[in-house]
Image (spheres, rainbow, N blue to C red):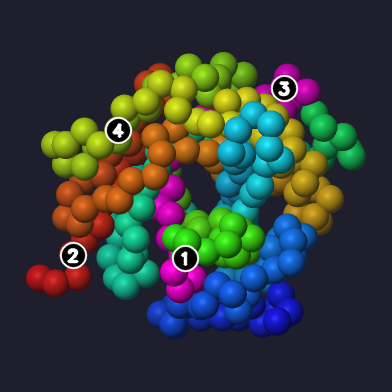
Amino acid sequence: MNPEQAAQLLTAARTGGPTVPWRDILPADRAGAYAIQDATLAATGPIAGWKVGAKNLHTEPHCAPLPASGIHASGVTLTGPAWRWRCVEVEVAFRLGRDLDPQGKLLAPAELADAFDAVLPVIEVVESRLLEGQTADPLAQLADLQCHGALVLGSPSTLAPAQVDLRTLEASLRFGAVSAAHTLGGNPAQDVWRLLSWLALHCARRGQPLRAGQIVTAGSCTGLLTAPVDEIVRGEITGVGAVELRFESQVR
């Protein structure tokens, strides 16, 4: 199956179609997964940002573009059959203040920090268009925009991008009155500047350079948890701010 055919199935699943058997769209390698991502974005609309992460300090990062249609302001209520998993994670995000051209090289932290104009708290909603998506091959998950469902944005903070240190970020997640997670330095990638430097170069080489106004997330601070319906889901990062959403029950 070519990237356009795979993207067609994934796009249909986003809009109420059947979930896709992951073996049907499994790419041979990361380049194939990124080709499916590009074909999906051609069908779903413009890129509003990127997610980038890594399993640890030593593994190569991976990324996915974030469709503008999936970006929401804090306080949003999400409802409908698209939210089958209701998996959420609290993350720190960066907003680009200008277009970023790395000119074919990995940028130093100071150069990167100068390109971003805001830090904000976000909740990523993790969702899949794949049948048995939670146990799918990682390449199939990567092709499916790395299981991205939606991104809910808190307000920009007063923290300067250069001050962000994933090792010291304190984050919490609450479901209504219940504390679901509280972490200090919970992001396994640890070095945010390594992630952002890799992403800038990757996107430029891919023909999708980072643009002013885009939001870049840098991996989970709290880990992935399943949220209940009809409760306020509240994420908070100390010194950065808070962000909220709610999943609404379809039965009233």
Q: Position of residue 72 (x, y in %)?
A: 41, 53
Earlier in the chain: of badge 3 and badge 4, it is 3
Left or right of 105, for residue 37: left
Picture quarter containing residue 102? Answer: top right
Q: Position of residue 226 (x, y in %)?
A: 30, 51
Which span is picked out in magenta?
108-132
Above or below, 25 against 89 in this view is below
- In the rendered image, which residue does mark 1 sit on? 133
Picture quarter with the N terminus:
bottom right
Residue at (59%, 38%) from the top-left corner? 55
- In the rendered image, which residue does mark 4 sit on? 181
Residue 114 in view, yes or no: no
CA–CA distance between discs 4 and 1?
A: 24 Å
Residue type marked 1: Gly
Residue at (53%, 39%) from the top-left corner? 219
Residue 153 in view, yes or no: yes
Dots 1, 2 in contact, CB < 8 A: no
Mark in the foreground, 3 or 1: 1
Above or below, 34 against 240 in this view is below
Q: Position of residue 185 (x, y in %)?
A: 46, 22
CA–CA distance between discs 1 and 2?
A: 22 Å
Left or right of 86, for residue 23: right
Which secondary structure lies at badge 1? helix
CA–CA distance between discs 2 and 4?
A: 23 Å
Q: How many marks?
A: 4
Which secondary structure lies at badge 2? loop
Residue at (30%, 60%) from the top-left corner? 78
How packed mark 1 is, by other alpha carbons closer than 10 Å (few <14, some 14-19, many 20 or more), is many
- In the rendered image, which residue does mark 3 sit on? 109
- In the rendered image, which residue does mark 2 sit on? 249
